[in-house]
Amino acid sequence: MNDLYIAIVNQLDNGIILLDEKLNIQLWNKWLVKYTGKSEEEVKGLPITTVVPRLDKKIYAYMFEKALLDEQKSFCSAAMHQYFVERKCAKMKPPRQNILIQHIQVEHTSYLMIEVYDVSNHFKRIQNLNKHIKSSVDFSKSLEHFVYYDSLTNLPNRKFVLDRLERLIEEEAKLFSLFFIDLNGFKAVNDQYGHLQGDLLLQMFAERCKHFTQKQEVFARLGGDEFVLLVEHMTTANAVEQYKAKIHELLREPFIIEEHQIVISASIGCACFPQDGTTARQLLSVADYQMYLQKAKK
């Protein structure tokens, strides 16, 4: 066999096994010597199934036959076997190997060449990549939540509401109402019981409203004790008053905080699209103004 060819084969970073037509080993390159600890002298002339017992199966016999008779290539991934050729160190974790079986013709002699690729690092890189992607996705979700949600109540925040309003306005065909809700007497709660209790009150109010909110409705906190409720497909005066009544009903039951019963009420204003405004800020401004008119009556 050509010395240059052998020298090249021995420099490859994968295993090369050359078999004759009887499936006896004719070449066992240095990668395999280093990998398995078996020298070429030990294995040369032996049947491949003796040296690599994993290949002593019908499926591989079929691949060898098809390669010899029909020159058909066969590829086997590590999914079939974690490894085809054993490492010399038994304590090492089982590697992952792919093999490629193909026909080689040298003048009038047929050979089979088996290429062995250790893809353990590929699998590790894929695992690391998957972990990185998951971490990136988790980070993106965390960042999105930070940008669009209120940290105290876990409700959507002002930016979320503005973005949602702008998308609905762009659709034009959709009608909706925006309720502006301000809690009456919240400052007195902070002054009497402390800001921690005030925060608990906001959280408890948010939880009540989450259960009240239906599909295609957005309940959000703008800041402080100001909240908004966005309701799609509803702009009639009667429906608006019914929603206001539902919100007032939510506040009839006292909030129990550290054995104290706290009763609060709310002032509610409303703006409807498109009659009360055609931009997000116009609608918020109108709803806010209507809320203050209600508060002034109390």
Image (cartoon, rainbow, N blue to C red):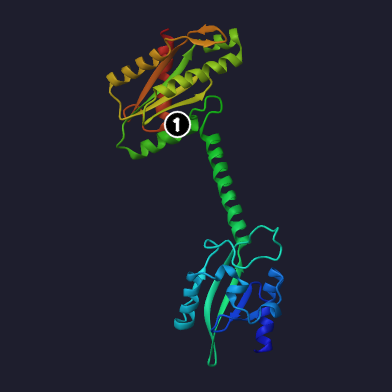
Label 1, on which residue? Answer: 161
- Image coords of residue 277 (percent x, y): 36, 29
Measured along the vertical axis of the image, is residue 272 above or below residue 166?
Answer: above
- Image coords of residue 296 (percent x, y): 43, 10
Q: Amino acid at mark 1?
A: Val
Which image quarter is the N terminus in? bottom right
SS category of the residue bearing label 1: helix
Residue at 52 percent of width and 12 percent of height: 186
- Image coords of residue 18 (percent x, y): 60, 80
Is residue 288 visible in this depiction of the protein?
Answer: no
Q: How many C-alpha atoms fall within 10 Å of the one at disc 1: few (<14), some, or many (≥20)?
A: many
Q: Is residue 269 left or right of residue 275?
A: right
* The quadrant where residue 151 appears: top right
Is residue 9 visible in this depiction of the protein?
Answer: yes
Q: Is residue 3 left or right of residue 234?
A: right
Residue at 56 percent of width and 80 percent of height: 23
